[in-house]
Image (cartoon, helix red, strand yellow):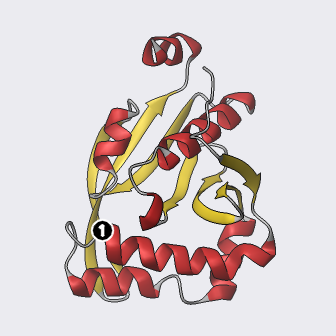
């Protein structure tokens, strides 16, 4: 599997000084990209979860987080927890549909394979299901979660990272 960045995009690890910017990116992403799949109250509750900066920093410190950068602007990020779970994936609305999420997923797939993981999982929002389906993730189950008093649905999805499967997926 090879990884090709969209034009002008670079990849770098998360730094603690990025936390505020990532919180803002999450909120923008939820309100602008997920509003077709979740109602206003659900989006508000979900976005509220990104307002506690200290909790957010603790969450990021427990994972490997990579940022996609375009001309010094963070256009998306992904967080890999325990080398087996995509914990967070958000793209700036300004860069939606430009291959940023696909690029970030490819990066963590390579990272997970390098760390001997045989599969990756994600609890994909309804907004992200089509992306993960395109990337050959398979749905496992539907979930409902409560965030700040609102029920939101997501789907647990998995991807087998065995070399034979990865080779087939890239052909």
51 is higher (above) or lower (below) than 160: below
Disc 1 residue crowd, few under 14, some 14–19, many 20+, Cα 10 Å? some
Tell which of 141 and 11 is nearer to you: 11
The x and y percentages for residue 135 are: 41, 33
The x and y percentages for residue 42 are: 27, 81
Image quadrant assignment for residue 146? bottom left
Q: Is residue 6 left or right of residue 97?
A: right
Q: Is residue 86 left or right of residue 156?
A: right
Q: Is residue 103 left or right of residue 142?
A: right
Q: Residue at x 45, y 65 (%)?
A: 94
Q: Residue at x 42, y 70 (%)?
A: 29
171 is higher (above) or lower (below) than 143: above
The x and y percentages for residue 120 are: 52, 38
Q: How many marks?
A: 1
Name the residue that disc number 1 marks. Answer: 34
Considering the numbered disc 1 on the image, is that residue within a helix, a strand or a loop? loop
Tell which of 34 and 81 is nearer to you: 34
Q: Residue at x 64, y 78 (%)?
A: 21
100 is higher (above) or lower (below) than 158: below
Image quadrant assignment for residue 136? top left
Q: Is residue 102 left or right of residue 42?
A: right
Image quadrant assignment for residue 109? top right
Image quadrant where one finds the N terminus: top right
Q: Residue at x 34, y 53 (%)?
A: 128
The x and y percentages for residue 81 are: 63, 54
Image quadrant where one finds the C terminus: top left
């Amino acid at each position: 599997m090879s990884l090709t960045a969209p034009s002008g995009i670079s990849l770098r690890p998360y730094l603690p000084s990025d936390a505020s910017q990532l919180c803002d990116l999450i909120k923008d992403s939820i309100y602008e990209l997920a509003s077709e799949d979740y109602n206003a109250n659900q989006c508000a509750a979900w976005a509220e979860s990104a307002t506690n900066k200290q909790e957010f920093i603790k969450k990021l410190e427990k994972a490997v987080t990579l940022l996609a950068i375009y001309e010094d602007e963070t256009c998306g990020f992904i967080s890999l927890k325990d080398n087996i779970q995509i914990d967070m994936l958000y793209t700036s609305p300004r860069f939606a549909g430009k291959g940023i999420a696909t690029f970030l997923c490819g990066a963590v797939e390579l990272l997970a394979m390098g760390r001997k993981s045989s599969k990756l999982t994600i609890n994909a929002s309804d907004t992200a299901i089509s992306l993960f389906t395109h990337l050959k993730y398979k749905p496992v189950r539907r979930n409902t979660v409560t965030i700040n008093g609102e029920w939101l649905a997501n789907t647990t999805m998995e991807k087998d990272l065995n070399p034979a499967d990865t080779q087939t997926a890239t052909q």
